[in-house]
Image: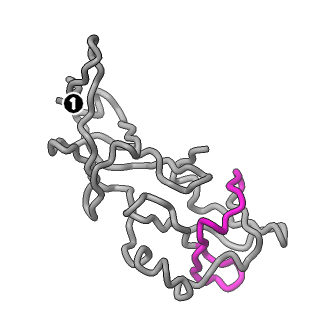
């Protein structure tokens, strides 16, 4: 099932062992190399410290929050040596500029959809510049269209449309 990025923030971390909340999700830890959510920054309910909940510790994602086995599923950031490089990047998709391979500006990412099973980003939602947004609204880009990810921008394949004889051609709405 796909869920929007905003549906994770400020959600509770729920423990199966205690039957109640043990923390609150603050933000995501996103790996820019494969667009996978590696984990979440959480506020510990008891110590009020900032901990990390790894995505492999998640048992289920429900409307009330994220379900884990117990409080021990959240770890101190210093203990997660393998995740140190990704954490230090502090990568976030929201607000990144999206351009095509032909250098055409499509807009900025204002949301993304994540597969709750694999925790991979599947769709990017792009708010177009004002003039284009009056004509067409918001764009949806599948992860298969992404060519390159940098600190400042996301490069995607040029949009195409299927013409009557089966060939593809650049979309006239964007060209």
> 156 or 15, which is in the foreground?
156
Horizontal and vertical percent position of residue 156? 28, 45
Q: Give residue 107's quadrant in the image.
A: top left
The stretch drawn in magenta includes residue 73:
no
- In the rendered view, would you say 130 is above or below 116? above
Q: Secondary structure at mark 1?
A: loop
Furthest residue in direction right, as rendered = 18
Give the residue at x 50% y 84%: 81
Q: Give residue 31's quadrant in the image.
A: bottom left
The residue where tag 1 is placed is 174
Furthest residue in direction front, as rendered = 166
Horizontal and vertical percent position of residue 137? 35, 32
Give the residue at x 67% y 64%: 58
> 107 or 104, which is in the foreground?
104
Q: Residues within 10 Å of mark 1 (few under 14, many from 20)?
A: few
- Image colouring: one colour
Horizontal and vertical percent position of residue 35? 43, 58
Q: Which residues are magenta?
A: 42-64
The stretch drawn in magenta includes residue 46:
yes
Give the residue at x 61% y 76%: 43
């Amino acid at each position: 099932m796909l869920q929007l990025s905003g549906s994770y923030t400020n959600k509770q971390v729920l423990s199966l062992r205690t039957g109640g909340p043990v923390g609150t999700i603050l933000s995501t830890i996103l790996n820019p190399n494969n667009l996978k959510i590696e984990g979440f920054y959480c506020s510990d309910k008891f110590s009020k410290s900032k901990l990390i909940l790894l995505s492999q510790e998640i048992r289920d994602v429900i409307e009330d929050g994220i379900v884990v086995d117990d409080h021990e599923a959240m770890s101190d950031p210093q203990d997660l040596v393998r995740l140190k490089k990704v954490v230090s990047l502090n990568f976030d998709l929201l607000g990144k500029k999206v351009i095509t391979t032909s250098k055409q500006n499509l807009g900025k990412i204002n949301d993304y959809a994540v597969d709750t099973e694999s925790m991979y980003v599947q769709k990017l939602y792009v708010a177009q510049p004002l003039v284009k947004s009056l004509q067409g609204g918001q764009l949806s880009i599948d992860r298969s269209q992404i060519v390159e990810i940098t600190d400042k921008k996301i490069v995607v394949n040029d949009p195409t449309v299927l013409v009557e004889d089966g060939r593809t051609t650049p979309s006239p709405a964007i060209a």
